[in-house]
Image (cartoon, grey):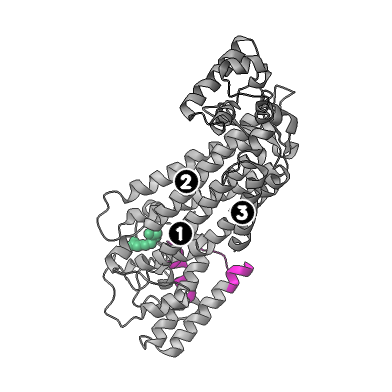
Amino acid sequence: MAVKSHGTHTDDNHKALWSGRFAEGPDAAAVEFETSIFVDERMALDDIHGSMAHAEMLGACGIISKKESAEIIKGLKSIENDLGTGKLKIDYSAEDIHSFVEATLTDRIGEPGKKLHTGRSRNDQIALDERLYLKRIIPCLQNEIITLISTLTDIADKNKKTLLTGYTHMQHAQPGTLAQHLMAWATMLKRDWLRLEDSLKRVNLSPLGAGALQGSTLPLNREMVAKKLGFEGVTENSLDTSADRDYCIEFTSDFAILQSHLSRMCEEVVLWSTTEFAFIELSEKWSTGSSIMPQKKNPDFAELIRGRTGKVYGDLINLLTMVKGLPLAYDRDMQEDKAPLFEALDTVEGNLKVFTAMISSAKWNNANMASSCEGGFANATDLAEYLVRKGMPFRTAHTVSATAVRKAIDAGLTKIEDLCMEEFQQCSKLIEEDVYECLSPVACVEHRQTTGAPSSKTTSVQIRNMKAFCKKSTK
Ligand code: ARG
């Protein structure tokens, strides 16, 4: 069966927008190769809204009549409504979303539809669609980030005193709490939210009116379109506007950093779910089993999130490579920007939702987390700082504490505080009975009261600030 396409359409409205120059239609395989509607259809609404603003401006500037402008806007509105109700289906024989909207409009309103593309090129139109789409969708992604931050902050709030050792080099480092760890995750995600917010500022300029590359001879009012569409202003240089895909790269790099955070968090979830750590138990709803090993309960969802990192990083490299070496202005290579942008966006959005569901349904094993603070000499820094408080230079105190650790290891002990007073005194005369109350994991945590540190007092401040951030940042 012959596939209907912009290459074979005989009906004028549905021919390729550029068909006038050609005596012959393109090869069917050529059409299939270059068509982008399957990827850009998700920007249908943005394309329609952009066209409405453009038509209004054309009318207001006297480039088309007020009547024609009104008819175009009415026609576009009916397309928007019918797409919304499902009465109108996307026609995949169209070359791209722009062609589909324009052809449908002309089918519906006749001659005035042919005036819509006045003073416009698909080069500035696609840039407009992308910018409008990002302005519309990024706030939804930001809200997903806020949901996860709130989830983590709520768990932290209940676990300000739940001990959990901190690691560096995957070796016991210093005692901490579950709350401190979860607030570290939340803080990483807060930066991701802020990064998106910052990128939104740069995408917030209207490209429409840049035309194909050198603006227009018609008296277009770019500022009016920008205002109508909620942009802060217009882009500065028409050539740059036609060639610019920085916003795709910038958002995808934001996604890649966010994904790196999710991946690191998942790595910890996987590790913490092992029999050896057993800090966390994932719910059965968010675990899978094995087809051969009957006992298995695997953290596949954390692994899948972690595993999809390559996809998001790949999308970023894809975009960076796409623009490398492209001469100004528009080149068709740039059509290839949407697939990686959307794939990265969809992937991080899905990952955020799954991570939130997985972590909020998990159970925490407080006893195992608390025992992680024992046995690794994680309080050695605390002993050194105890001596600093007694007047010893830190470098000397470091050596004294290391001597105490050595002594304990040599005596087959697992904790510094298992040394008797006589043994402590052999390390330093400054060590007295009060050392014991400084060395318990609870004391080690509660004495860490610098801003951002894990004492319950300073964690409470972090939690309070993060809750306020979530409240003011929900869109
Ligand atoms: N589908 C194209 C894209 O996504 C739209 C612009 C087409 N422009 C052109 N000169 N062929 O980039």
Foreground mark, 1 or 3?
Answer: 3
Q: Is residue 463 visible?
A: yes
Q: Which residue is mark 3?
A: 466
Q: Give yes or no for residue 101 being in the magenta stretch.
A: yes
Q: Mark 2 highlights which residue?
A: 256
Q: In the image, residue 293 lies at what x, y percent?
A: 71, 22
Q: Secondary structure at mark 2?
A: helix
Q: Which residue is mark 1?
A: 198
What is the spatial separation of the Cα atoms under label 3 and label 2, in whole angstroms? 23 Å
What kind of residue is marked 1?
Asp
Q: Nearer the viewer, mark 3 or mark 2?
A: 3
Secondary element under disc 1, as helix, strand or loop, is: helix
Disc nearer the start of the sequence (3/2): 2
Write the residue at 69% across / 43% down: 160
Q: Nearer the viewer, mark 2 or mark 1?
A: 1
Q: Amino acid at mark 3?
A: Met
Q: Earlier in the sequence, mark 1 or mark 3?
A: 1
Mark earlier in primary sequence (2, 1): 1
Image: magenta residue range:
81-105
Mark 1 Cβ inside 8 Å of ligand 1: no
User: x, y (%) of residue 453?
Assistant: 59, 42
Labels 2 and 1 touching (C-beta < 8 A): no
Q: CA distance from mark 1 to mark 3?
A: 19 Å
Q: Residue at x 32, y 51 (%)?
A: 323
Q: Image quadrant of ligand 1?
A: bottom left
Q: Is residue 187 left or right of residue 122?
A: right
What amino acid is labelled 2 in the image? Answer: Ala
User: How far from the left and from the top, in percent, is residue 254?
Assistant: 46, 50
